[in-house]
Amino acid sequence: MTKGFLFIFGDKIHETMKKINLFLTAIFATSMLLFSCGAEKAAETEESADDSQTEVKATEQRASPLRTLEGTIGNAQALVQYGAPSVKGRVIWGDLVPYNEVWRTGANESTYIDIDQDITVEGEILAAGRYSIFTIPKVSGKWTVIFNSEWDLEHGHFQYKDVNDVLRVESTPEWQEESQEQLSIAIESPGLVVRWERLKLPIVMK
């Protein structure tokens, strides 16, 4: 009787241990699955961060860097953004940039200016706002400077429409002896000054 009882009791202990082992195995498998999912998500996040960083680097490495500057024109705070192309041994005026045609005054997307107060440009009033800036180069004499309400144009003058012109004025270019490799736009006296190759184009703003 005692031996039978011990046999049955031992058998029950064995079954209990098997159940405990199965339970522990299930817990371990679930833990590993959760850990694996977490690792995959972390890898995805890290990969996304790498993609984002690559895009930033690509923007920084574009052929014509995107420049942004801020300053004061009269009593207005002004912000200007433009793409800065380089000469790279090319013929600029009358070739890369044709005469008597609208030019984006930079590279890639349209150049624009943002002013928080009204100003005058070559004696004409330009209301506060954001405008793309286009120019029409001339073989001789004054250049036409255009302020257009469509400022966010991805392809610059290729999307330009004169029906959106807000203001057109004339500015007198100056030709320098030394050539400047990369285009620059500065907020300085007498307002806004564009420089590239031998060109210096002062646009009078107050």
Image (cartoon, helix red, strand yellow):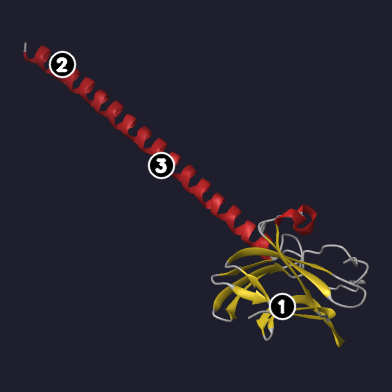
Q: Earlier in the sequence, mark 3 or mark 2?
A: 2
Q: Earlier in the sequence, mark 1 or mark 2?
A: 2
Position above or below: 62 against 8: below
Q: Quadrant of the N terminus?
A: top left
SS for dot 2:
helix
Q: Amino acid at mark 2?
A: Phe
Q: Quadrant of the C terminus?
A: bottom right
Give the crowd class for mark 3: few <14, some 14-19, many >=20 residues within 10 Å.
few
Residue for badge 3: 35
Q: Quadrant of residue 109?
A: bottom right
Q: Amino acid at mark 3?
A: Phe
Residue for badge 2: 7
Give the crowd class for mark 2: few <14, some 14-19, many >=20 residues within 10 Å.
few
SS for dot 3:
helix
Q: Is residue 86 visible?
A: no
Report whether 55 appears left or right of 64. left
Residue at 85 percent of width and 73 percent of height:
87
Residue for badge 1: 122
Residue at 47 percent of width and 44 percent of height:
41
Residue at 54 percent of width and 54 percent of height:
49
Give the crowd class for mark 1: few <14, some 14-19, many >=20 residues within 10 Å.
some
Position above or below: 80 against 18: below
Residue at 69 percent of width and 85 percent of height:
190
Q: Quadrant of residue 123?
A: bottom right
Q: Are marks 1 and 3 in contact (CB under 8 Å)?
A: no
Q: Is residue 24 visible?
A: yes
| 36 and 106: which is toward the camera | 106
Q: Nearer the viewer, mark 1 or mark 2?
A: 1
SS for dot 1:
loop
